Image (spheres, grey):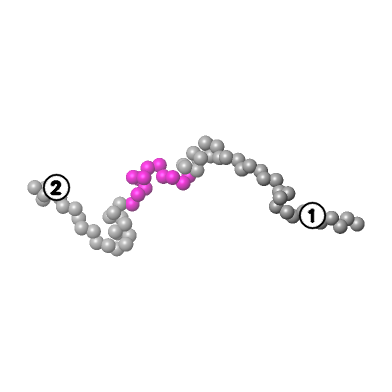
Amino acid sequence: MNNKKPSSSFENLVDTPSSEPSDSDIEKLKNLYLPNSKADNSPSEKSIEDANDLDHPKPPSPNSLT
C-alpha cells in the first residue's frame, strides 16, 4: 500500500506566464466598452434636469441681449 500523500504545496505549482492581450483584442474591447464619440452619448444639462424633475431656465434669446 502506498502511504505517500499528494503534495498540495504552492511551491510545486508551475507559474505559467499570463499571455498579454494582442492589439486586436484591445481594439475589440475599446469598441465594445468605449463610445465612439462622447458628444453623441453624453446627456445634456436639460435632459439631466428633466430626469430629476428640476426646472431649468430657458436661455435668453440673442436679440434680447442687445
Residue 23 percent coordinates (x, y) = 52, 36
Q: Amino acid at mark 1?
A: Pro
Q: Secondary structure at mark 2?
A: helix
Residue at left offset 81%, top offset 56%: 5
Find the distance from the CA under tag 1 to the CA under tag 2.
Answer: 83 Å
Left or right: where 25 falls relative to 39: right
Left or right: where 66 falls relative to 39: left
Query: In the orientation shown, which residue stands out farthest toward the left?
Result: 66
Query: In the orientation shown, which residue stands out farthest toward the top?
Result: 23
Q: Amino acid at mark 2?
A: Pro
In this picture, which residue range is highlighted in magenta? 32-43
Work out whether mark 1 precedes mark 2 in sequence or the reverse, and give the earlier one: 1
Residue 24 percent coordinates (x, y) = 52, 36
| Number of the label disc, if any, that sits on residue 59 | none
Number of other residues with Cα within 10 Å of mark 1, as a class: few under 14, some 14 to 19, many 20 or more: few
Q: Secondary structure at mark 1?
A: loop
Residue at left offset 29%, top offset 63%: 53
Depth check, front residue: 49 or 27: 27
Classify 23 as above or below 44.
Answer: above
